[in-house]
Each structure stands twice: as C-alpha cells, then as structure tokens.
Image (tube, rainbow, N blue to C red):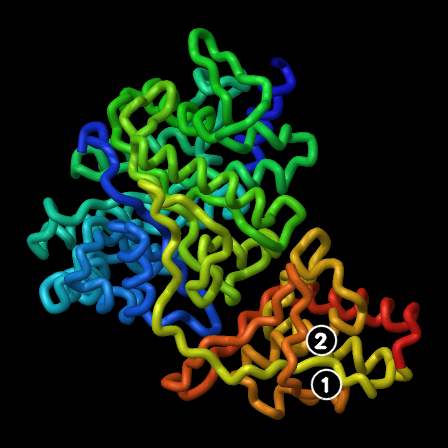
Amino acid sequence: MGQIRLVWFLFLCLLGHEGLAKGVLGLACNWGLQSTHPLPANIVVRLLKDNGFNKVKLFEADTGALKALGRSGIQVMVGIPNDMLASLASAVGNAEAWVKQNVSYYISTHGTDIRSVAIGNEPFLHSYKDMFARTTLPALENIQAALIKAGLGKQVKVTIPLNADVYQTDSGLPSGGNFRPELLDLMTKIIKFLQENGGFITINIYPFLSLQADPSFPKEYAFFNNTASPLVDGSIVYTNVYDANFDTLISALEKNGFGRMPIVVGEVGWPTDGDPNGNIDNAKRFNQALISRIIQGQGSPKRRTPPDVYIFSLLDEDHKSTLPGNFERHWGIFKYDGSVKYPLDMGNGRALVPAKGVKYLAKQWCVMSPSASSSDPNTLAQSITYACENADCTSLGYGSSCGNLDAQSNASYAFNSYFQTMNQSKEACSFNNLATITNVDPSKPPCRFEIMIDTRKQKAARTPFKSSASKMEGIFAALVVVLGLVICGVH
C-alpha cells in the first residue's frame, strides 16, 4: 500500500502533467495536424462520423479542418497555440480579430459547430517555468470579451487545457490534492473566471507517461482492467491511476471552493510505437477499456457523473516534435492514412471503420542498394543522419516496431522514410549511390515500410521539422546502422 501511495505521488510530480456534465453522448477525440502528408480534411471528417465521434478538439484554427467540419454535426473545440497568448493578452483588439477570423467566420459562413475555445495548451508545465504565467489569464479574459462582443458569449465557451502537474498531493492520496503553491493564486483566479462565464476546466491525463518516466511504476496500475494492488484513500478504493489522478483534481477544486466546477478530460490515450511500453497490445488494452468506460457513462469515485473525454489521438503525426520521446508520433488509434491499427469495439459491437478514398503515391520504396559498399562508413552515417533528421525514424528505436531489423534493413528504413516524405522524388533516393528504388515491399512485420499519401495538390513537401531531438535521433540511428554493417561485414 505504501508503495502505491509513493508511486502515485511520484506520478503527479513526473507529469510535471454547465454545472456538472450531464453525461456523455457519442465519442470525442483530438485531431492533430502535424503531418508531412496530412489526410485530406474531408476524409478525416467522414472517418470521425463513421466511427461515432461527435466531438473533436483541434490544437489550432486550421482552415481546411474547420471548413470540412462545417454542417457535419460534429461539435468543435478549437485551440489557440501558446505562442499566440502574448499577442492576445496584449490587446483585446487582437482577440477580437482572432475570434472574427477563426470562430465567427466559420460559424456563420460554413456552419461549423464551434462550441468552445481552448486558450493555450498546458501553459503551466513545470518545464515552461513561468513562460506563460503572465499571459494566459489576460488572453482568456480578452477572448471571452471578444466572444461576447461577437454575440457568441453563450454559444461558445472558454477553457484552458492543463497538464496534471498543476496539482499535487503531499499525502500521496487523491484526498490530499491541491494546486501547486506557486500556481494556487493564479489557478483560483482562472477557475473563478471560468465559472463566472460558464466555462470549464480541461485536464490532460496520461497514465502511459508514468511508465515511460518511472521504471518502478507498477505497470498494471496504469490500466483500467488490472491486477494491481488498489490504493485505499479513506472509504474510497482506487484501482487505477486515471481515477486517482482525476480525483486529485476534484480534491483540489473542493479545497478552493469549486467543488462543482465542470471538467473535461482533454487528452488521454496510449501510443503504439516509439517506446517499449508503446505498443499495439498495450494501446488496445488501454483504449478499449477507456472507450468502454465512456460508452457506459462511468465517472470517478468522487464524481460519478462522467465528463467528456477526448481520446488522444485520432491519427498518427509524423511531423510532431520528438522532444518528449519518440512515442509522440504514434498516439493515433488510426495510422497516418486512416487505416486501422488494431481492433476496437466502439459500442454495440461496432468495429473501427477505416478511412475511405485515400490516394497513395506509387507502390515503390527506397532501400539500401545490395551493391552498396561499407568501405566508407562516414558517408553512410551522414546519409542516414540526414534522412532521419528530415523524416520519421522513430520506429527504429529500442523496443519499437522496427527495433529488431538487421543493419541493412535499418538503413533501408531510414532511406525510405526520407524518400516517401519527399514525395518519392528520384533525387531523394540517391544517398551518394547507396540507395536504389524497388517495387518489392521491404516490410518485415511488425515493421512496415510505409508509402505516403498522395498530396499532389501541394506545390511542395512541407519543410521537415528539425529539433535537437530529431538530430540526435538521426545521429543515433546512423551509429547503430553503421556499427551493424561493420560487424556483419556488409559490402
């Protein structure tokens, strides 16, 4: 019991992460847009509808997504990125312009059912320090004022998506929950403002991150259907960390006079790749139990009324930053192209329905040439590093779906990822004559060598995201492959 209490306390630290809702109708999810070859918005909207999603959260006011969602019957939460908070906080006129362009326009012109605006995304993370502490509340106030001026004050609500690290528990139990001391005054002001204006709190809860960050965390406690020892908090028994986390927030709200504040779970899910714990089996186990809870209308021990829960995420995103970890690009319950990763019962025996009408590039791949020489390992290393800096090699990592490839296949995976990202340009499969194009699928299950979506309407491929993490990923992949080639004597 003491171990569970300690682990729960560490979990909260590591995450660094309408009256009461009247119950959940349908399903909700996050639709991320950080992809080099995004699935067309109209196909995504059909994918949402085919699978019973009637609510969706966008992280930014994307034109294509907001237009496609028009008159779809899907309710929309549209987000404002953190880097816009300073501008919106500085002048109400900026907020009015944003609301006019990104809310009023889509509601009136396209019939998009925008129900809420999310100001920032986890702006009070420990790692951000106080970067957004002075701009988040003023931005919230100005957006609310702009919505009222636009005649949308009652129709469109405001919220701030928060990481679970805004609260903590000194006792290691949910009943000991309160907001971090340095945030208490600010959180009180924010919640009071949300309450007065009919808004709600949005909280992101990630049991997966406890496993990813702390090897001593009892794995079973991260899942709903588990064999873990329960956590006993007075008369309440917690059988999983999700409920314990949620009720720690409830306790924090109760201590500060906001016991009936409405809450939405803005992100919760499990990745399928990029980490030893991020795999198909774990993701299926977690997400199936999560969906079953949502469908059954199950709340937490302290709040039986179920909140809206936005599953993270709908689709994989190969353009996301990997700074938190390689798993960041693999949260989707669908692959990047809307194909099904694993079976899920979406209610009443309904299976997942894949995306329809997806068009792909030609069935060809870029692989390391059989005649390539390892006599110059520096050239090979540089080529692989370049490929992985400019494309997605996250599946090559330890414990990932392609982590057991031989050295030559490792290099081929990196080359093909770059080749596909660059729309199969012949020049993208050269690598100093180390690579060649083939019509034979080099995939080695569970490792898939993907073919990208055809985005011919785009004039050019998007500039690949380059972070320090992606550079390290490329260097690491190169070193692993070159070492393997030297050891195996490939020539």
> Front-most of 466 and 457?
457
Q: Residue at x 83, y 71 (%)?
A: 482
Give the quarter of the figure containing the C terminus: bottom right
> From this viewpoint, is residue 129 visible?
no
Image x and y of residue 402, in percent: 68, 61
Mark pair 1, 2: CA separation: 8 Å
Secondary structure found at label 1: strand
Question: What's the residue type where badge 1 is placed?
Answer: Ala
Contact? badges 1 and 2 (CB < 8 Å): yes
204 vs 272, left or right, is left
Image x and y of residue 68, in percent: 24, 67
Q: Give whichever of discs 1 and 2 has the lower sequence position.
A: 2
Task: Return the residue at label 1.
Answer: 435
Label of residue 119 in the image: none
Give the quarter of the figure containing the N terminus: top right
Task: Return the residue at label 2.
Answer: 412
Question: What's the residue type where badge 2 is placed?
Answer: Ser
Image height check: is 296 above or below 235?
below
111 vs 421, left or right, is left
Label 1 Cα crowd, 10 Å radius (few <14 / some 14-19 / many 20+) = many
> From this viewpoint, is residue 449 visible?
yes
Image x and y of residue 86, in percent: 35, 56
Image height check: is 81 above or below 444?
above
Q: Residue at x 44, y 21 (%)?
A: 177
463 vs 357, left or right, is right
> Front-most of 105 and 446?
446
Secondary structure found at label 2: helix
Quarter location, residue 488: bottom right
